[in-house]
Image (cartoon, rainbow, N blue to C red):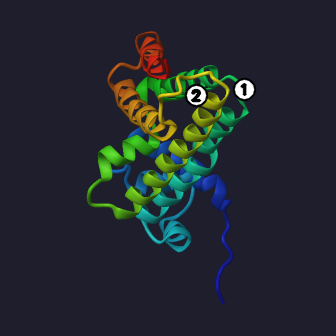
Amino acid sequence: MARTREFDTEAAVRRAMELFWTRGYEATSVRDLTQHLGIGQGSLYAAFGDKDGLYRAALEHYRTTLAAAALRGLEEGSDARAAIRALLTERIRIAVEHGGQGCLAVNAVCERLPQDAATRRTVRDMQDASREALTEVLRAARDRGEIAERHDPHTVAAFLVTFLNGLLVSSKITPDPRALEPLVDIALTALD
């Protein structure tokens, strides 16, 4: 008879996400995970298959919580520039927390690719969702006359996602919002 799982899987994924985000994939051992999550190695393997399975679950949790919340904030803004500025500065704030932990998705790409196709797909899905959300915001802003008519919303959205990725990598090197936030103003000149 199979034993019932004796831990909260969702809480375990959230805690694993925090550990991977702080330490990275390679620097986080299965032993670190079992100690941090308060579960046995057998339970970890039964629930997630292996360390990679738990890492993918943590990335997915990041995508459906923090990354999704950032996009919801973008959709709620009526002024495109203000909404985009808020998105970018909030991502800086999150990335510089805890001494510059960066962005879990960008960290995953920097650490795990090209060998991990599953991570590539998950992060690409996040990037696509960000680009699509920004495209819609920019299309509506162009229709309202908030940004120049000559801009292709899709291309500007792709630029902003690329800029954000670079900004998030920079946040690991320089975890200081005062140094990074002025760069947002320069990026927003692309809307002029």
Label 1: few (<14), some or many (≥20) within 10 Å? Answer: few
Residue beneath label 2, please?
87
Q: x, y percentage for residue 174?
A: 35, 19
Q: Which sits in the foreground, 128 or 103?
A: 128
For the view shown, which residue lies furthest in the bottom direction?
1
Q: Which sits in the foreground, 93 or 77?
A: 77
Q: x, y percentage for residue 139?
A: 60, 36
Q: Any mark on residue 78, and which?
A: 1
Instruction: Name the residue rendered at 43%, 53% in the picture.
Output: 124
Q: Nearer the viewer, mark 1 or mark 2?
A: 1
Instruction: Name the residue rendered at 69%, 76% in the picture.
Output: 4
For marks 1 and 2, the one nearer the N-term is 1
For the view shown, which residue lies furthest in the front direction?
150
Q: Is residue 144 left or right of residue 147?
A: right
Q: Which sits in the foreground, 80 or 18?
A: 80
Q: Amino acid at mark 2?
A: Leu
Mark 2: secondary structure: helix
Q: Which sits in the foreground, 184 or 114?
A: 184
Q: x, y percentage for residue 75?
A: 68, 36
Q: Is residue 36 visible?
A: no
Q: Is residue 161 left or right of residue 6?
A: left
Q: CA distance from mark 1 to mark 2?
A: 13 Å
Q: Is residue 130 visible?
A: yes
Instruction: Name the residue rendered at 49%, 24% in the picture.
Output: 92
Q: Amino acid at mark 1?
A: Ser
Is the N terminus in the top left, top right, bottom left or bottom right quadrant?
bottom right
Q: x, y percentage for residue 62?
A: 56, 47
